[in-house]
Image: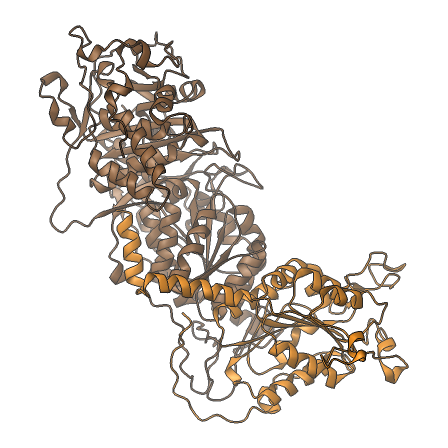
Amino acid sequence: MKDTTTTPETDAPNSAEDPTAPRGSLTATAPSATAASQSDRADLRPESINDAVIRLAGDSQDGIQSAGAFLARLAGRSDHDVMTYMTIPATISGGPSIFQVRMGTGEVLSAGDEADFLVAFYQHSYQDHISFLKDGGVLLYDSDNVQPDLDDKRFVYVGVPITGLTIEALGGTAKDKGKNIFILGLISKIFHLDVEKLTTLIKEKFAGKNASIANTAIMAFTAGYAYPVGNVLTKQYKFETVVPKEGDRAQITMDGNQALAYGLIAAGVRYGAGYPITPWSSVMEILRSELPKYGGIFVQAEDELGAVSLALGFSFSGYLAVTGSAGPGISLKTEAIGWASMSEMPLIIINVQRGGPSTGLPTNVEQSDLFQAIFGGHGDSPRVVLAASTVEDCFYIAIEAARIARKYSTPVFILSDTSLATRIEAFDEPELKDLMIDPKPDLTPRAAGFKPYAVDQITQHVPPGTRMLDGKYPLVSGLEHDEMGHPTGSPKLHMAMTAKRRNKLRQLAEEIPMPEIYGDQEGNVLLVGWGSTYGPIHDAVKLAREHGEKAGALHLRHLHPLPNGLEKIFARFKRIVVVEMNDQGIYGFGQLATILRARFCEPKIESATKTDGLTFRVKEILERVFEGRSFAARKIPREGLPIVHADPSSENVKSLKEVVPQGVG
Amino acid sequence: MSEETTIIDAPREKLTKKAITADHPTWCPGCGDFAVLASYYKVLEKRQLDHEKIVTLAGIGCSSRFPYFVNGYGAHFIHGRAVPLASGISLARPDLHVFLFGGDGDGFSIGGNHLNHGARKNINLVYFIMDNFVYGLTKKQTSPTSPIGFKSKTDPTGAIDQPVNPMKQLICAGATFVARTHATQVNHMIQMIERAMDHQGFSVIECLSECVEFFPGAFDPANPRKGGAFELIDEKKWDNTSEDELRHDVTDELAAYKLAQLPFPGVFGVFYENDRPTKNALEKKWIDTTREKLGHPSDLALLQKTFDRMK
């Protein structure tokens, strides 16, 4: 619109008090928890909804991630399920960026294909993302920067001079920094969010920082909340209240990298080493500052090879350790992982996958390192590979990885990816007291006859510092070795030791529970997935079943070894489609599909892959699996909403001076 | 984490050479590394360290076979990465004595980056480099310390690349104990190992250790029995005499660097020693102040508090 930076202060007639003001105008007041109850007119009563997808589109420096994170955390505190989706540019500063929040009172599995609400900061944000706005959806745009095509009658247009109003609310020095929090205030108003909880969150976030930062944030929030958006948007929404059930655990919200880091801490991992690389870095940053609190150390190493070697040193010393990276860094660690396999040294290796090969698509999502995790390296080097399916699973899989690494004295990979790393989800607070592990090494003297590599047993190393009462001390070796760890060139021993290292994985496979099938237990099609595609695959199956398909979903967390008995599940479906974010390869099958076909010799296994660097949309999966069939989109309350093209021009806008209590915060 | 499990002390026998000897070395007869192994045994015997607290580590190379010849905890790691492996052990377990053995290829070529950063971070360990100026295990290729003109299978007309000067590199990288010795001078070697052990920090000893197979006679110029001169660094005694002014101050980095410039075979002894805090101490300080500030909570209470903030 044309009201660019015109300040409402100077030329805006006070429309809110004008009897001819558009229907639905709200008297703007200072935010309070009771704001929603101030209006009792039926047309102002907010529509009750249980699910909304809000996409914030701007540039990476606009802080839309933190605005999105506030929404996600609020949803968590209000017992709503929440799922977020974020893209960040590969550039150091600047570049388009989005944050999508899906909040709902039901089970939220995926971040949503289409947005109900699009917030566009810039013209490019509008142009790039308008196609993600569903028909009847609301476009909320910064009228200082965006000129939408108002002739497109599919959407509701709400223009707010966000930049100008933010500058005005915060004064000159902050410039337009704070737009994100202004937007947050605006969204809070539209969705009747719990302002008290939100302001508490904002204050908590900035606690410990300069008090003026928190004040500025509250001022921006208040300004956004006070904006008379009711003048231009006649509809308001309110999430259905969720009443927590007796015994329900509190919800916590975090991203996947946080969940991995805290899962490791719960699992008793106190030492680790890494080297910075996107999108793994935040795991090491968290561990670097958290582990000293627990008496541990995380070392930023000189390179990836040093990092894995340090971690192996920690493990050798008796403390199961972690290293991690993204694909390129894992390549560098590969030789040492071979040593871990040969010497049977427990180690956790996290790969937060991104688009590859080489530097590839460093800030996009891809699941193309499965082969690397399972086979990467020289020689026959068995290792365990697990993949987390959700943010919550990142927490629990870290604990499982540690358990397996200790029990089987083996390197264990945890595969995550960009999507899990950066998205925020709410989940039930884990029962920590049942999960926490005391990591102290056992230094009790060992009786005579200890052999680190006994052929007929699973290796259990003894940490240095433990007295061997027969005076014979074990060695840990990368050379093929005998039962005491001393080198051997004996073909017989190499065969026996190779089998020993492989057989412990077979033993592990026996204890892996058969995964549950979601949806139909038998029928037409089984969708098989691994990793972060859990949500969209399950949503796709849900939708397909609602449309009469007999479909199920099987999600694998244990990729190497695979659980035993999958063939029995496969036998119950006519089609098996493996959905994954990697290339179909020269033979037409993605990485997991290839492994499953090799393992089960099952010709009905099909492959649905993609390499656009973006998470799967539910629609995409359905189109691939059920070619030619159309599925109506998810039903949400806004369907059938009358399309309103409100006039967001500045005449309708009250002066900020009038609506914002000065000196708030 | 630093509190160790209490161990009921079973009676201890004296640590003898026999107790710490393992496999018979696989080195060629006459190899300089035998003397290094013998010196190591001697030092362990003399110091009577707790047997279970001795950790002997190595990367890859002839000299890196070392841990197999010692009965004690040990690891034979991959080529060039033994410094970070040893760093992990040293940082997590201050109760252990961490000894690391390797050659010139392992230390100055494939592991060069780790050497620099181990030195910079001043990790508390002893790193003994057996420098033979040639790749022996792979049968005579040029090493990073091979002198210009040395004929090898990869430089049939003589090496052309400027060799690494180990002393200069270690001083510049920030190693806090830098010494040089010769495999034929066992008493000197033992002295150097003991001083390296007593130093808190990244202690490196370069030992000229002859490869009789692929570079015979390389170190004769520093061997008096072969007509050479084993010239020792004359360290300052701080006795206020006029002679003392001419002696070497081991804390003087520039003086150490000048000694390192002397033409081959140069001088032997401690070039440089500095009491800069170790990473071990700095990390421990961080842990201690953090835990103090938090009031020494249990692990469970700590993590619960973090989760409470995420609600």
Residue at 18% in and 8% down: A18
- Percent x, y for residue B26? 70, 79
Q: Is residue A50 left or right of residue B42?
A: left
Nearer to me, B166 or A551? B166
The correct choice, above or below, for B21 with respect to A422 in the image is below
- Percent x, y for residue B163? 80, 60
Residue at 65% in and 60% down: B116
Please tell me how many numbered marks the rendered image carries. 0
Specify the quadrant that holds the N terminus of chain B. Answer: bottom left
The correct choice, above or below, for A278 with respect to B235 in the image is above
Nearer to me, A659 or A272? A659
The correct choice, above or below, for A630 with respect to A498 in the image is above
Residue A362 visible to an observer of this rendering:
yes
Residue A296 visible to an observer of this rendering:
no
Q: In this view, does B34 lie to the left or right of A375?
A: right
The image's colouring method is by chain
Nearer to me, A73 or B75? A73
Q: Is residue B104 left or right of residue A527?
A: right
Q: Based on the displayed image, in which of its 4 quarters is residue A27 positioned?
A: top left
Q: Chain A is drawn in which colour?
A: brown
Residue at 17% in and 5% down: A20
The correct choice, above or below, for B289 with respect to A274 in the image is below
- Percent x, y for residue A289? 42, 55
Q: Colour of chain B?
A: orange
- Percent x, y for residue B270? 72, 74
